[in-house]
Image (cartoon, rainbow, N blue to C red):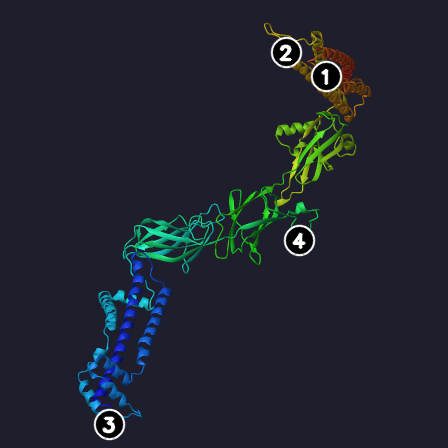
Amino acid sequence: MPSLDPKLRTLLDDVRRRIRRYVIWDSLLAVAAIVLAAFWMGLLVDYLPVTVGGSEMPRSARTLLLFVVGIVVLVVVARLLLSRLGRPLPDESLALLLERQHPELEGRLVTAVELSRAGRSHDSHAPELLQLVHDQASQKSSAVQPARIFRGQPLIRKALVAGPLLLLLLVFAFASPSAFALAAKRLMLFSDNRWPRRASLEMVGVDVPVVTASSEEQLDPARLVFEDGVMKLPVGSSGILRIRAAAETAEVPSVCTVYYRTDDGTRGQSNMRRVGRMRDGYQSFVLDGPPLSNLNESFEFSVLGLDDRLTDFRIEAVEPPAITGLDVGVRYPDYLRAGSATEGLAEGFDSETQYQAGLRISEGSDVTLRLASSLPVGDIDAVMESGGVEQVISGASFSEDRRSFELKLVDFRSPTAIRIVPRNPDGISAQSPYRYFLGAIIDEPPSVSLALRGIQSAVTPVAMLPLEANTTDDYAVTSLDAFVASQPAAAEDMETEQGSADQGSAGRRKIISRKMTPDRDGDAQLVMDLRQLTNDGVIEELRPGDVVQVYAEAEDGFDLDGAMHVTSSEIFRLQVVSAEELLALLERRELGLRTRLEQTVTETQGLRDQLAKFQAAGFDMEFAPGEEDTEQARSRQLQVLRLRVQQSSLQVSKTTEELTGIAESLDDLLQEMVNNRIDSTDRQERLGSGVRDPLRQIVSASMPKLKSQVEAIEASVSDPETATARTGNAIQTADQVLLELTAVLDKMLDLESYNELLDLVRGLIQDQEKLKEDTQQERKNRVKDLFR
């Protein structure tokens, strides 16, 4: 088989090389166009937002762009370059391609190539003819133009895209090498540096007020900084966002704006205000309004000033721990626990209750506060204030899950205000202190009152002193003592002159005491017998002119700080007199009671006369001259009559009370005679059965009857006939009362005459005694004269 003509082989090899160069250039231009277009698009997307205050593409977007460009380039290289370069280019195909573009070859090139192919068989042709075809094809090959088989439009189109983009790239790199380098580094992910801007903003942080339990200490706001663009603030807080703008190396914005979006999708914006002047090359801006004021929801925000933007900041609203419950455990002081069911307990409380307003705790108790929190507590700030003085409460003990803690108040003494600020482990605190107030039950000293029943200001040397004491205390009285102090008249005069109550200067002054046992109501009774005390030698014999002082002292169990609560009652000063002197005093009191009874009789007579006037008038209406008898006038006159009857009823009540007082005074007088051991049985019987008992009978029987009758008159004033009849009954009762009171008064007059006789006899006896003393003195004088 003859080989292909060398000239034709050269032509075909040239065409083959041209085709491969065309594929390479087409692929390279396509890749260049893609890469350059991606560069400029990435640059525009990355930088153009910066010019209007936006932010650069995030690294994730740049990574995605680089990945997409790489995939596209690989696809282009695989499809336009590798796949085409890997395809075979046989001579037959190349010859056919040339024949299409050069018709003048008239198939000779294809025939020559086909018949010269190695391994071809079964061809019936003459060698001379094949040689002729080769010669003719070789002659015409000199006129063949291989370039005509290529289309230049695809390359031109790709060059028109890649060329300008490359030219712009070169201009950009020559005009601003730093910007070109930054763009290349950012798009190639070699750097995350931001594009230079006119303004330069820096995040400073958020100033939040520091919440403390103390009302005296005011701390400066704490400045918090963002960690990885995130900051946690307590719900309800009002922070101040602070940024600063470089003033020396960049332009200062006239205003900075915060753009925010809350977690529920709400969007908004707030302008920051410029604060103060430029300092250290920076101008400060603050935001003290929404969304930071009264924070209640987490939000993301960015800050825009001119062409600079601070982005990807987030503030998380965190619920601070809240105190959900407070239990108060109390352990009473030992003196309150003595004898109780809790005595001797080493642990535990005497009482435990939930806190409520108005809770009061006994003075001297140890108090344990058990507080529960809604969230784990990292730390607390606790202060107690008592008497205007604040004191930090330390030593809080926390539970294992830190959702509860205890505070101890040792030796609680006075009303105390407690303020607590809980904080979570991140330092997020409640926005206001939790306030509690514990009142103090101050153990007041006991009160004691003492009364002498049937004893006035004077007693005989042999008197009995009936003591009646009443004590009250917050808890219980541990001891109640009655004291009797005897003092001669001379010693008392000495004390008065010296202005001192010292027992040493009082000479014979002596104090004795006796225990009194109060009942559940605090009442106690005791009889101090002066005669018995004298006979037993407890006190010296009392003489007229001496003084006896009686009082009581009560003590409770209070023992805090070694102090004691001892309270004394009123001191009763009793003058010691003889039986005759005491009787004279009693007689003067009898005279006063008779005068009161006479006044009562006179008032009762006036009451009777008033009732008689009602009966005589027949309860007829009295109209003023010129006043018509109208319904209104009758109502007014009826009201006047009713008021007059009411006055009579009040007079009956007054008389009853007065008679009761006289009877009680007589009873005291009789009791005083008994207590002073005055042997006057006749006098006691006359005062008791002759005066006191009749008065009580009048008070219990006649006066209530008269009272009911007068009230019946008042009820029937509008019925003259009934009122007149009832008035007659009341007059009869009043007459009976007058008769009874007159009889009692006559009895008192008889007693007065009897007392006058006693006074005369008493005077004669005193005159006789005086005459006897004078006679004895005269005899002594005469005997002395004999020895002169």
- The CA span between labels 3 and 1 is 175 Å
- The CA span between labels 2 and 3 is 173 Å
Q: Which residue is mark 3?
A: 127
Q: Amino acid at mark 3?
A: Pro
**Residue 561: percent from left, percent from top:** 61, 45
Q: Is residue 171 above or below residue 109?
A: above
Describe the element under mark 4 as helix, strand or loop.
loop
Foreground of the two, 89 or 375:
89
- The CA span between labels 1 and 4 is 72 Å
Looking at marks 3 and 4 on the same chain, the residue that comes earlier in the sequence is marked by 3
Foreground of the two, 320 or 471:
320
Q: Which residue is mark 1?
A: 712
- The CA span between labels 2 and 4 is 83 Å
Looking at marks 3 and 1 on the same chain, the residue that comes earlier in the sequence is marked by 3
Q: Which residue is mark 4?
A: 346
Describe the element under mark 3 as helix, strand or loop.
helix
Looking at marks 2 and 1 on the same chain, the residue that comes earlier in the sequence is marked by 2
Foreground of the two, 362 or 39:
39
Neighbours of disc 4 within 10 Å: few (<14), some (14-19), many (20+): few
Neighbours of disc 3 within 10 Å: few (<14), some (14-19), many (20+): few
Describe the element under mark 2 as helix, strand or loop.
helix
- The CA span between labels 2 and 1 is 21 Å
Q: Is residue 212 above or below residue 148?
A: above
